Structures are given as structure tokens and as C-alpha cells.
Amino acid sequence: MSAVLNEQIKQASIGKSGQIRIRCPQCSHQRKKKSEKTMSLSIDGDAVLYNCWHCEVSGRVNKEIRSRIMPTSNTTTKSNATTNSNANNTNGSTKEINISEYKKTPPSSEYMRLFEDRKIDYEKLKHLVVLSGTKYYSRNNFNQPRESVGFPYVLGGMVNAIKWRSIKEKDFTQDGSAQTFWNIENVVEGKPIIIVEGEFDVCALYSAELDEHYNILSVPNGACLKVSSEVDRENDKKFKYLYHAKELLDKTERIVLAVDNDTAGENLKTELSRRLGRSKLWVVNWGEYKDANECLVNTSADHVRKIITDAKPMPMAGLHEASYYEDEYDNLYEEGKMVSYDTGLELPFELSKGLLMLSTGLPSEGKSSLVDQICINMAVNHGWKTNYMSFEKPPALHMCQLSQLYIGKPYFEGAVPRMSKEEAIQAKEFIQRHFTFQDYLSGSSATVKGIVERGQKAVASYGSDILVIDPWNFVQLESGDRLDTDAISMCLSELQQFAKASNTLVIVVCHPAKPADRSKKFIAGGMDVSGSMSFFAKSDIGFTVARNREENCVDVYCWKCRWNWLGDQGSTKLDFDVPTGRYKSHVNNYDWDIEEVDLDF
């Protein structure tokens, strides 16, 4: 067997085991079906048995990995730094690749031109080991050796893999299996780290002299086509290099992700952030360029250094710089405070979106009816839409009550003339435009998580502006081992987040705890709501509805209003019309002409 065939078979078997098939290096170029894989390789340890069923060439070769190398300088690879990150060789069977055998000849012109074309200053790569050699590649059927550049990977203080790239054709092959960051042997403890997506990007950043201030490392296996569903260290083979460098990464306070500016690079950022934690990560914006080397080719070393210096902290949910709110800040100066909306009643407060409002009062005092009136008024006057989670009211009966508030006449027959059929249809059409219902009686989840999920759907699909939960005591707490008061606090925080994220007014109707002394008149406040002090602490607006039997009216007490431009603590009196359930101002009657209402809200 010729030495060329021997070398070609050894190259094809690198990193492989068991049975594989390849194109026969001896006969495939002579056949019509040149791409047909007619040679079988049986790889067992260092021995490779081969057989081509077409030309019947067969035999055995021993795998030996030897390459002519050319280091970038006379300096040797540092090994002391690898103790920080590579001491844990989890494979145990990893074999050392000898890179000491090389011809002491100057780098070839092709080799040097590769770095010149990439605008990489070769003289500044003195701490890197970049190899020059000839390798066989599968694309040309292992027929002709190609001038190549190689990047040795160090694991456990020894070279265990070399990634090769042909200089002209941009083909790739690998000796061994790269399982660590490239350039890990040169790390200096205490320096921040830059992580890039390729070895030439490391060379580009060295050329820009960033190695003086940073440890510059490349991932061994490129980026990710997709983001994994979960992180499982036992099966996290693609990111094994992170676990080999765990001690180093844990000690490093600042890690700059300077990966490629494409979809795969974004996926890699996501995967790295899941494993390293966002708190220590910074991200680079290459702008119109794909990566560090392309940026260096098209701009300058100074520009590359500036981009690295201008890296921004990786965004974290709920954490932003002041500049994130710049537009809103400027808008408040130009247009004033947040927009407030009149309730249509003489109340001590106005409404705004993104808030959590609490309504309380003793049973049968009218707190739910006042919330319904407010929602109807907001629909009529401002076009707002409401999504109800009303545990005690079947949606059809609730619609009847809302139609009475809208028309101003009873829905059912009684002492007072009821609304006409035409008015009932008009009210129904108005309600259909402005109200949606979460139907508890048909099986809707009563947890805050379930209510919020359907509330989000109502916002997205129907444009809801208000979410009403009435009453709170029907909500199922997922307390687990926590006290109910802590579980309530977490639920209210979730409602606050929903209100702000979806720009929705959330109204919660709550019952107060029973008063200790029932012989005295009791006006419940926010601190009297049953279950937790958090009802008072976390609400933005809170009010109490109480019957005033002496004056035959209803008193409304506002005991909290977080923003003074929306209102203040105080009280007002409202009249209540029993046949229709309508509230109106105690002094100036509130009414509207339904003929003037725009039904196209």
C-alpha cells in the first residue's frame, strides 16, 4: 500500500470509531459515481482495517498523528495557566498530540498572506501558537495534501487536539477532539475575559493589542443552530469547555461576549448566559460587521478596541440603565404627568392604566356595584374595555346588570318600567364591544397565574384596558409551605407586574376582616382587608364603599392614592338608584343620553 493511501485513511479515521464508510481514495476518482462511498473502515483503538468492495484494495494501518508545524514565534506554549481551568481531565483517555516535530523553515508565502489578507499583524501573535502543516481533506477525497493553518487545543496541560483549516479552499478537519477554549493556556488570573466564536477572531483581537488587558478565548465548536430546551450538565457535551474552565470562569468578574453578529451568535449568547449567569456578562455590538476579524479588516485596530471598550451589560429582566427610560422622561417634561381619566362620578381620585386598585367594604354595601359603574363609565366616556373574573356572577346575569347601568332602566319586569327590546339589543351590542368574561363556573382556573394568563389574552386579542377580580376570597392561593400572608403578597406582586407590563388597570374587590366590636359603626380601610397587610401596601389606589343610612346615600372613602396628581385621601357621597343599580353624584345627578354614545369605540 502506498504511503499516500496510508495517510489518507489515517486522516479519514481521525476522531472516529467503529464502522464508517468513505469514498475510496484509490478508485473513486476513476469511476462515474465519484461520490459513492465504497470503502469500509473498521476503527478499533489505534488500528484501522479498510476494504473497498469496488477495487478490492484492503489492509490495515496504525493511526499516528504527525504534522509539520510552524509556531508563530520561538516562545513555547504556557502550561502553568492551564491549572486554573484544565486540571480536570474528565476523559482520562485523552492522548497527547506531539507538536514538537517541525521543520525550522520560514512560514510559507501562502501562510503569511492568509494573515495579511485578514489585516492581522503577525508579529503581535507572539504569545499564540498557530501551526503550519499539510493536511488531507474529504472534499477533495483525501487525494491531495493542502497547505493548512492549525490551532492546537490544550487540555490538562497537554495538546489533545488540533483544528486545521486549508488556506485556499477553506476546508476543515481536526486531529483529536477539541474540548476546551482555544488559548486557554495563556490566561492570566484576574483579567477580564473576552469570548469569541473563532480562532481568527482571537488573532484579530491580539493584533489590536487587547491581550494586554483581557484574556481572549475562542469557543472550540462555533455557535448554536438553536437554543436547547434545558441545561443538563451530564449531557451538555457541546459546552464541555465551560465545565473544564469552571474555576477560571467563576473567579472572573467580567466576561465580554464578542461572538458573531448573526442568529447563531445570538443563540450562543443565550446558551452562555444560561450557564454563566447574566450578572457578569457584557455584550459587544459589531454593528454592520459579522465578527472581530471582519471589523478589523474593514476598519482599524483602534475601532475594534473602542467596540470592545463600549460593551454593554447583558440585559437582565427588570434591570435597566437610566437611558432606557429617556424617552418617557422627556415625554413627561413636555406633556406633563401620566394621563389621568375621570371616572364619571364625584370621586376623590381619577384613574390611569398600569395601576393596582383595591375596592373593599362590608358585604352588601355596594363595592362590586360601584366597580361595575366605574367600568361602564370608562367604556362610555373613554372607550375602555374590561375583562371580568367575577366569581359570584354568571356572565349572562352580569351582562343584564351592566345593561341596566348603560341604559338606566331595569332589565327585568318590576315596579319600574323595564328597557325596551331595542334598548336591550343596543345594550348587548355595547357590552359585546367593551366587555369580556373569564367564566369561573365553566372551569377557568382560579389561581392568579391562570387569571393573569387569560388577562394577557384579553389584552392581546380584545384590547382590554381593565382587569377586574371580584371577589378576592375566591382566588386559590398556591402557598405551598408559605404562610397565606406571604402567598397573598406574591400574588399581588404578580398582578402589579401584569398591570405595568400590559398597561392595564387591575381592580381587585376584597372583603374586610370581621370587626372585633360589631356594636359600633365600622368603616373598613386598606389595613382591614382580610388576609394580609400587603393589600394596603401594594395597592396604588384604595377605596371603601359604606352605606350611610342616616343620609340615605353611600359614602366612598379613598384611603390611599399613590400619586397626588390622580387624587388624594378623602371621601364623597353618592346616591344609589336601586332599580337600575346606578350610582350618581349626591349633589349633581350624573347621567348621559344613550343616543349620543358612540358605539364604535
Image: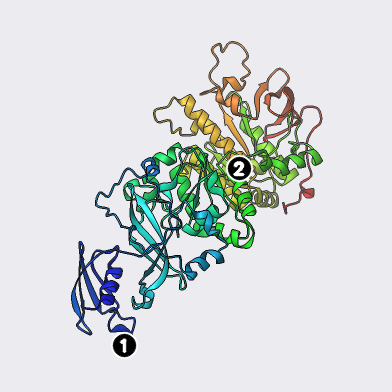
Q: Which mark is residue 501?
A: 2
Vertical arrangement, residue 124 with respect to residue 564, above or below: below
Q: CA distance from mark 1 to mark 2?
A: 67 Å
Does residue 407 show up? no
Q: Residue type at mark 2?
A: Ala
Quadrant where the image shows the N terminus: bottom left
Does residue 28 show up? yes
Helix, strand or loop at label 1? It is helix
Q: Which mark is residue 406?
A: none
Q: Which mark is residue 30?
A: 1
Please give left or right for residue 373 compared with residue 334 in the image: left
Q: Residue type at mark 1?
A: Gln
Residue beneath the point at 55% across and 40% down: 389
Please give left or right for residue 232 compared with residue 569 in the image: left
Q: How is the image coloured?
A: rainbow
Vertical arrangement, residue 345 with respect to residue 202, above or below: above
- CB atoms at circles 1 and 2 under 8 Å apart? no
Residue 422: percent from the left, percent from the top? Answer: 70, 52
Residue 499: percent from the left, percent from the top? Answer: 61, 39
Residue beneath the point at 57% across and 26% down: 535
Vertical arrangement, residue 432 with respect to residue 556, above or below: below
Residue 358: percent from the left, percent from the top? Answer: 62, 30
Helix, strand or loop at label 2? It is helix
Residue beneath the point at 49% across and 40% down: 449
Q: Earlier in the sequence, mark 1 or mark 2?
A: 1
Residue beneath the point at 64% across and 59% down: 299
Please give left or right for residue 76 compared with residue 264 in the image: left
- Please tell me whether mark 1 or mark 2 is closer to you in this view: 1
Residue 117: percent from the left, percent from the top? Answer: 56, 67
Dividing the picture into quadrants, the one containing residue 105 is bottom left
487 and 241: which one is in front? Answer: 241
115 and 370: which one is in front? Answer: 115
